[in-house]
Amino acid sequence: MEEQDRSSQPRLPHVLIFPLPIQGHINSMIKLAELLAIAGFKLTFLNSHHNHERLVKFNNIAAHFERYPGFEFKTITDGLPLDHPRSGSWFLDMFEDTMEPKMKQSLREVLVNSSPPVDCIIADGLLGFALDVAKEVGIPIIFFCTSSPCSFWVYYSIPDIIQVGELPINGTEDMDRLITTVPGMETYLRCRDLPTFCRKLDIEDSIYMKLVVEQTRKSLQTDALILNTAEELDGPILSQIRTKCPRVYAVGPLHAQLNTRLNAKHGESRDHISNTLWEVDKSCIFWLNKQPNRSVIYVSFGSIMSMSREQLVELWYGLLNSKTKFLLVVRPNSVIGKDGEGEDVVMELMEKSKDRGYIVNWAPQEAVLNHPAIGGFFTHNGWNSTLESVVPGVPMICWPQFADQHVNSRVVSEVWKIGLDMKDVCDSKIVEKMVNDVMVDRKEEFAKSASEMAKVTNQSVNVGGSSYSNLDCLVEDIRIMSL
Ligand code: UDX
């Protein structure tokens, strides 16, 4: 009798989550996976062998996910040998010809052999091939765009911008010209805020441009779209995206939403959980513990960006000459110099920084940004970093380099008004001035706007808030899809 009752229970929906094999994408997709596991789904997180090895090595992943009996990590190849350095422009160089065919084949095999069968795929918005596989095997698919909604909308609009003749850009004097063809951004989007591939005269031949435009347009052909933002942060742009894809779930910031739900379910916060692909140096927290409140600027540029030796030295002099202490992250192999000069300069700066700053290879970023000693974030504006700064109300100095970062920095400085934009410059005098502005001279002004932004963002992930309710809708819609 007992057996019969058990078998008559409805099967749990089985969702497969498939991120792009890059830190910034894994970060948000693993949080979404955990949120769906909390909702009671069976979850398969499909990771590359290379990244999974690192996730296990540097985090307490196995112990943490044990609490969800239906949660499983599966691994596939990303098409590259395990010992490939995956640095520099590896991703763009290898994606289309080497990585995509192998990942597509592996995804197909996983889906065909899955038991219980997968009811719904949630794929990274840059993995357009997942749509073809999903159609082939007849499984519903939702795309998750892990970068910002404003960049998604700009990528979508690029063919229109070219068609009306607002691109290409004619020389440097043209960089402040407003772009008028992206609905909702007519008053603030300048040429210099477009992704950097738009700066090329032969933009129509840019492989990168074709890739992102194609992937963006493809992700609107799926059953629905998930975005890591809140209605309160990106409402006007979400309305524009909804004209092309009516089912858009804005469920972010995911790290904050996960905090709320973990607290409710297990009475704990996320402080002890990480999903980093590098070894974290926690000593910086002890150093921060000794600093006065809001006295330190945190300086970090994500998981992909590299900089030249000269750029690092300019930044460092600007920081050193400012009136503020700094915590600087320099990822291994991220400084480009001749014959190991990049690494040498880091050692030299570390030695000279002792009284004014602290340098680490990789920081526990969320914990750092939530530390009371932090008063500002000097960032490249990767979308995760941007949201991680918004949630604790930390004002930003923006130094964007590629992808969504140029438009993100414009939104931070011009729309949200919670920071300053240093795009296209790297000069120690300007670094010094901006650090002093955010940390000293205009400190209260930025702290006020950042804390107001934090307040509405945090409300969105609390019970009854917009992102909280949107996640409930997503969960319900996946349940219906799985019947
Ligand atoms: C990439 C793109 O560059 C970015 O523009 C896009 O929005 C997402 O994919 P990345 O450059 O790594 O990501 O930036 P970001 O999105 O900010 O992600 C970096 C992640 O690494 C953050 O979640 C951050 O908390 C984490 N991190 C960074 C650390 O944990 N420690 C560090 O020292 C630095």
Image (cartoon, rainbow, N blue to C red):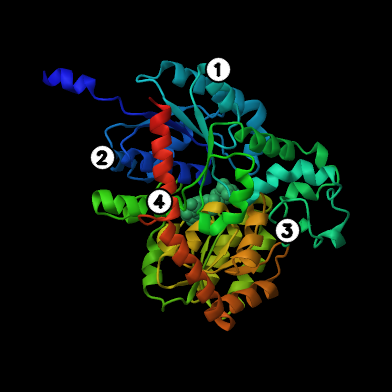
Amino acid on which the number 4 mark rests in the picture: Tyr
Above or below: residue 344 compared with residue 445: above
On screen, 149 above or below 328?
above
Q: Which is in the foreground here, disc 1 or disc 2? A: 1
Residue 136: mark in rendering: 1
**For disc 1, does the CB lie below 8 Å from ligand 1?**
no
Q: Which residue is identified by label 3?
A: 189
Give 315 or 479, whichever is nearer the viewer: 479
N-terminal label among 4 and 1: 1
Instruction: Tell me which label, 1 or 2, sits earlier in the chain.
Output: 2
Q: Residue at x 46, y 61 (%)?
A: 457
Task: Measure the C-alpha gap from mark 4 to mark 1.
Answer: 33 Å
Q: Earlier in the sequence, mark 3 or mark 1?
A: 1
Q: Which residue is mark 2?
A: 67
Q: Amino acid at mark 1?
A: Glu
Check contact, mark 2 vs mark 4: CB within 8 A: no
- Residue drawn at x 55%, y 17% is 136
- Badge 4 marks a residue whose secondary structure is helix
> Would you name the residue on which mark 4 appears?
468
232 or 37, which lies in front?
Answer: 232
Could you tell me if residue 434 is visible in this image? yes
Q: Earlier in the sequence, mark 3 or mark 2?
A: 2
Q: How many marks?
A: 4
Give the image location of residue 289, x and y in percent: 36, 72
Rendered location of residue 68, percent (x, y): 28, 37
Mark 3 and mark 4: Cα distance apart in space: 30 Å
Q: Is residue 343 left or right of residue 371?
A: right
Structural distance between the alpha carbons of marks 1 and 2:
34 Å
